[in-house]
Amino acid sequence: MSRRTVARLGVAVAALTAFDVIGFLSGAEHHGGIWNSVPLGDLALGVLGAGVLVWFSKRILKRLLSRPESYYDGTRQP
Amino acid sequence: MSALFLHPAFWLFIGIVVVFANRRRMPGMPVGVIVALGALLALLRGVEGTLETTVAGFRLVWFHADRLSLLFALVFAIVALLGFLYGSHRMRAGETAAALLYAGSAIATVLAGDWITFFVFWEAMALSSLALIWQGGTAGARRAGMRYLLVHATGGALLFAGIALHLAGGGETSLGALASDSPPFWLILGAVAINAAIPPLHVWLTDAYPEASTSGSVFLSAFTTKTAVYALLRLFPGTEILVPLGAAMALYGVVFAVIENDIRRLLGYHIVSQVGYMVAAVGIGTPLALNGAASHAFSHILYKALLFMGAGAAIEATGLRRLSDLGGISRQMRFAVAMYAVGALSISGAPLFNGFISKSMIVSAAGEEHLLWTELLLVLAAVGTFLSVGLKLPWFAFFGERRGVAVRPLPTNLLAAMGIGGALCLLYGLFPHLLYSRLPYLATYAPYTLDHVVSTAQLLLATGLVFYLARKTLAPSPGLALDTDWLYRIPLARAVSATTGALAGVGPVVSTLRGEAVTRLDSAARRLAAPGAPPRRRESFAFRASIGWTVLFAAVAVVITWLVVWLRNPG
């Protein structure tokens, strides 16, 4: 990992942390979900949600469902 | 109501006549822009009321305007105007006429006040959208159009059967909520579910929309699914089954979008996902949720049209449609990329954009009803939306690795349409009261609270971080992903092949009649796509099978309806 990459990640993490502090200080939950009422909840949901989505889509679904562009060519389909 | 009142859809229908009367003299076709503007101005008057007539003993309410129908008709007119402006440099008479009929039928459907008028324009919408898909002009467009016809003929048969049963059972002719758990309820819900693209009945959308022309896709993205959302709001508010269906739908579209390589198919999966929010909201059924569904449909039509315009701009500029072929073209089309970014931030629900307002209403409505899993799935779908439409698509299509793709300059009308679309997304995001004042139900909602804005920003930034770390994993690759259409494109097609083969063996008359019908329909499709092209006599199995399926489904629906009606009223 290059210095530039580390610096970018650092900025991203700092921004996320700052947002979380503001969110926590601002108090009230808004949607009612548990992720809104605990510190780092929204960040965790975002990271976990996006991470699981990438993992499931690209590692599981793509392997199961991916076919060549010509898959339906020559089949007797409408 | 003024005696000089003109139904907004009539503007568009009159446009069809003007287009065909002047098709040799006006190749640029500004007619669409003019008549769509006329329809929009008629709707901006916001006249509520009813116009009706009696035909053969049936009371036909062909204009029924209340806040719900006017909201949908208004946004349909806006997007029609944008679509015609966007495509005015390339749309020929046939495509313009198909788009006029499609937009006019959509407006007439949402302004219909009785079941018969509703059915007639619902079907006119299906046929005109089919013509619009065929205008794509490729073999892929013709084949996808046939599959589209098959699915929508099934939906039309279900709707017809449901309405016939409803009326035969002594139901009201005026359009309204149906008694739950009755046969008409489920038949009509099935028909609407097909048009709303609720999985597993959704593939007609992701199959056909990418095959239309770049301007055709803009129209297609707006009308069919949102008319279905209107029907759900009008006929099925508070139907609980729609809540899990909608939440699953929102996530389903997102998951498939992450692995999709075709830019317009990726956006098609996000229509499925975003309509999922609306379907779930209709199922929740509270005033806030129903307002959320209506306002999300309004917002979605604007930003999705903008996104399809952006994808179309990339295709028009490069001739390429796959993420794996595109890349590094942002400098040559800065304005189009900027407007695409507005659409992407809107669909992702970023603060200051219209999607933030409407999406938050639905998620909040789920929270207020303590539907924790629904709320969680909708939030995860929002994360996935930003991941694929807000980051993956623009990164790999516009930025990323340069592939030496030649970029043609984009016409001014195309950029102007994108500019207006982007401005509207921002306008309704910055001034939500402009939208609230038109919503059908009484409910208050304040989107711009500090914790809400901060929470949304956290979700988006966390998603950005994951994209940054996983961008190599997310890199697109050539190929297609199987979806539920596999079922009718491979095993069911084989079954139909065996059936029609056996049918053909019964007698040469059946075979001849079927072949003649297929030949005529296919010739019509070819003439629509390429006027002047000679008709082809020998047709492929694909067309024969499609016709066989369509006729089979329609016939079965009619027979079932007749039997049920006869059993109920044998005299």
Image: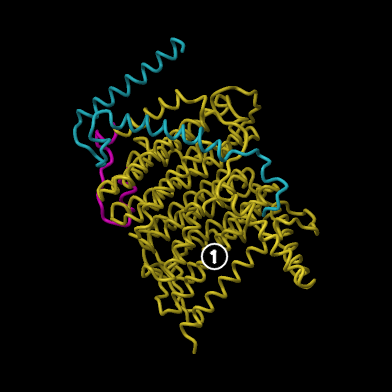
How many numbered discs sit on the rendered protein? 1
Q: Position of residue B147 (x, y in %)?
A: 62, 55
Image-based side of B480 in relation to B184, left or right:
right
Residue B450 appears at what percent x and percent y? 24, 33
Q: Main secondary structure of the magenta part?
A: loop
Q: The cyan chain is which one?
A: A
Q: Which residue corresponds to the image point at 42% horizontal and 40% vertical from the top-left?
A: B347
* Relative height, residue B216 to residue B116 (above, below): above
Residue B432 percent location from the top left of the image: 32, 44
**Which is more toward the observer, B336 or B448?**
B448
- Classed neighbour count for the residue bearing mark 1: other residues with Cα under 10 Å, few (<14), some (14–19), many (≥20): many
- Give the x, y percent position of residue B134: 65, 52
Q: Which region of the structure is painted magenta?
A: B432-454
The foreground one among B483 and B204 is B483
Is B435 magenta? The answer is yes
Residue under the image location 44 percent in, 66 percent down = B186
**Tint applied to chain B in the drawing:** yellow
Q: Which residue is drawn at 35% across and 60% down?
A: B239
Name the residue nearer the viewer: A49 or B312. Answer: A49
Hey, what amino acid is under mark 1?
A: Gly
Report the quarter where the N terminus of chain B lies: bottom left
Q: In this view, does B467 lie above or below B1?
A: above
- Up/down of B477 relative to B181, above or below: above
Question: To which residue does mark 1 refer?
Answer: B156
- Find numbered disc 1 in the image and state the secondary structure of the residue it sits on: helix
